[in-house]
Image (spheres, helix red, strand yellow):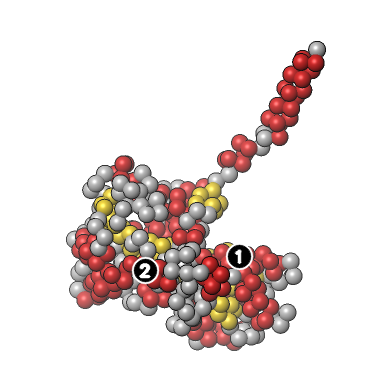
């Protein structure tokens, strides 16, 4: 009898267990996507859509990419569309640029944009200038993409943010996405664009999940290059960021909400062209401005944003000086504590906001 009672109790416990997990199917149906998945999907869809599109770079084929950004693409599309190269950025960036001039649409992957320094002559002097120097006869529809900026414990020579480097150059379009929606819509737009595009990803964001709407899940979903997005509405101060800087802004805004401070967060998405209007309209609404980025302070994106506000009619709406939160003006250290203290943290942003608002 005891055995029967134990079995009945066990079955009852199993029923409770099944009931307690009854919500899991609904959770599984919620749409979310990691940055890695969003980029892989965007490339897959564009390679399938247009026979001129191909991916080229180190370890992108049989190894699925150093960060698994091209996982499964070689098996699906083959050697002609997913091209492994030797370790020679100057070589394969030149091949890709020439292919673009000849009418193809290459996606040139740098294992990290720090290695793009080996190929910068092709990016700046060949790809960016060909359309102008040929009087519009030679288009270069190429995308240079890969992780940009600091990761974790990779040392000074592998941690630079090239946002301001490339965004200074006429002839290039420069994108720095934050969310999965950004990556899907903007990478597809970049591949279809007739101009050379530098697509700056962030390694620390690759594994993060972001919600994805039905619209953004469509194979036809494309976002316009040169348009930013209000990630969070607010009325007390405007926070402007891009890439991982937006994440810091969002976390700071959430923390300050408990103190009654409502921050408006602007995700730039595109660095060149820069969406001035979205920043100006936000500053006219909040009257305060703070920029956040992981790059160095001198000649930074934040410097450009603040300068444009100061040179526009939005300047008259400011009730306090604009402030930048940037990476420390030093080569990034390898030691973990020094590395963390050299990059913007939520506490830095919160402290700066309270300072500008006199809180």
- Mark seen at residue 218: none
The answer to whether one can see residue 226 in this image is no
SS at badge 2: helix
The answer to whether one can see residue 356 in this image is yes
All told, the count of numbered labels is 2
Q: Is residue 134 above or below residue 306?
A: above
The residue beneath circle 1 is: 250
Q: Which residue lies furthest to the front in this view?
A: 335
Q: In this view, does 149 lie to the left or right of 12?
A: left
SS at badge 1: helix
Q: In this view, does 65 lie above or below 266?
A: above
Tell me where residue 80 appears, x and y as whole percent. 23, 48
Badge 1 density bin: few <14, some 14–19, many ≥20, Cα 10 Å: many
Q: In this view, does 335 lie above or below 3?
A: below
Comes first in the chain, label 1 or label 2: 2
Residue at image coords 45%, 57% = 183
The residue beneath circle 2 is: 114
Residue at image coords 56%, 64% = 247
**286 and 290: which one is in front?**
290
Q: In this view, does 82 lie to the left or right of 262?
A: left
Tell me where residue 57 appears, x and y as whole percent. 29, 57
Residue at image coords 25%, 63% = 88
Question: Which of the 4 image quadrants contains residue 123?
Answer: bottom left
Q: Is residue 219 left or right of residue 357?
A: left
Residue at image coords 67%, 64% = 254
Tell me where residue 262 appears, x and y as whole percent. 68, 70
**260 and 351: which one is in front?**
351
């Amino acid at each position: 009898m005891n055995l029967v009672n134990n079995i009945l109790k066990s079955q009852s416990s199993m029923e409770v267990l099944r009931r307690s997990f009854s919500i899991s199917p609904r959770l599984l149906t919620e749409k979310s996507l990691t940055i890695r998945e969003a980029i892989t999907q965007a490339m897959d869809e564009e390679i399938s859509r247009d026979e001129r599109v191909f991916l080229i770079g180190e370890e992108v084929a049989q190894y699925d990419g150093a960060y698994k950004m091209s996982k499964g693409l070689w098996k699906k599309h083959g050697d002609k569309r997913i091209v492994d190269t030797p370790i020679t950025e100057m070589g394969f960036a030149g091949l890709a640029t020439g292919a673009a001039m000849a009418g193809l649409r290459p996606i040139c992957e740098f294992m990290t944009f720090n290695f793009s320094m080996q190929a910068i002559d092709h990016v700046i002097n060949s790809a960016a200038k060909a359309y102008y120097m040929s009087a519009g006869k030679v288009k270069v529809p190429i995308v240079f993409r890969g992780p940009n900026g600091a990761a974790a414990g990779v040392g000074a020579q592998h941690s630079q943010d090239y946002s301001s480097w490339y965004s200074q150059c006429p002839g290039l379009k420069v994108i720095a996405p934050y969310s999965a929606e950004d990556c899907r819509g903007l990478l597809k737009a970049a591949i279809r664009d007739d101009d050379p595009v530098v697509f700056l990803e962030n390694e620390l964001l690759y594994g993060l999940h972001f919600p994805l709407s039905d619209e953004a899940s469509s194979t036809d979903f494309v976002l316009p290059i040169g348009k930013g997005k209000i990630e969070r509405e607010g009325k007390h101060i405007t926070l402007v960021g891009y890439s991982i800087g937006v994440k810091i802004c969002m976390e700071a805004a959430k923390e300050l909400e408990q103190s009654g401070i409502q921050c408006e967060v602007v995700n730039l998405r595109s660095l060149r062209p820069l969406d001035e209007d979205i920043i100006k309209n936000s500053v006219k609404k909040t009257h305060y401005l703070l920029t956040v980025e992981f790059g160095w302070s001198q000649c930074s994106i934040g410097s450009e944003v603040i300068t444009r506000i100061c040179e526009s009619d939005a300047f008259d709406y400011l009730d306090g000086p604009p402030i930048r939160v940037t990476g420390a003006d030093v080569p990034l250290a390898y030691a973990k504590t020094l590395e963390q203290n050299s990059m913007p943290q939520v506490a830095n942003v919160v402290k700066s906001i309270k300072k500008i608002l006199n809180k």
